Amino acid sequence: MNSRSGRLGQEEKALFIPLARRWFLSFQGGDKDTEYRAYGPRWNERTCRIGRAATLALGYGHPRLSRIVVGFEKLDWRDAPQAAKTIFPNARHIAAIKLAPQAERSEGGSPK
C-alpha cells in the first residue's frame, strides 16, 4: 500500500472541508492557510494526517479548492485563536489543520 492508499489498497478520499464564504475566500486569496475545527473523531491526527489531500468547498457545493495537509496540531481551547473559540465554545481541544496548495500535475500525473 502506498501512502495515499486506504484499507484494502483503495485510494484514500480527500479530506472534505466545507467552509463559510468568509473563510473560503480567505483560503482562495492566500490570506488563510490553517483551518480550525473542534478536535474529535472527524478532526484528529489520524483523519488529518500530513500528506493527505483535502478539498475545500464553499459550503457543500462549488467552487472547490484542492489542498494538501502539511501540518496538524491539537490545541487546548484556551490556546486557540479567538475566532475558533467563538465558533467552538464547548470544545476542550481544537484541531489546527495547516493546508497548502497542491502542486499542479502534468498529464502524466507527476508534479510539474
Image (cartoon, helix red, strand yellow):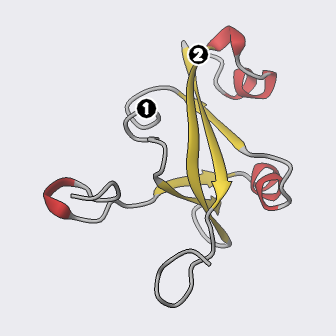
Residue 80, position in %: x, y?
A: 71, 19
Horizontal arrangement in the rendering, residue 102 relative to residue 16 (left or right): right
Task: Note whether 30 is above or below 62 in the view shown.
Answer: above
Spot occupied by residue 92 in the image (x, y as percentages of width and height): 54, 12
The crowd level at tag 1 (other Cα within 10 Å; few <14, some 14-19, many 20+) is some
Q: How many marks?
A: 2
At 46% across and 52% down in the image, what residue appears? Answer: 52
Q: Residue at x 83, y 55 (%)?
A: 30
Which residue position is annotated with label 1? Answer: 45
The vertical placement of 101 against 44, above or below, is below
Picture quarter containing residue 65?
bottom right
As helix, strand or loop, the secondary structure at mark 1 comes to loop
- Residue type at mark 2: give it: Asn
Image position of 3 (left or right of 80)? left
Q: Measuring 56% from the left and 55% from the top, which residue is drawn there?
A: 68
Pair 2/1: label in front = 1
CA gap, disc 2 and disc 1: 20 Å
Q: Name the disc covering residue 107, or none.
A: none
The residue where tag 2 is placed is 90
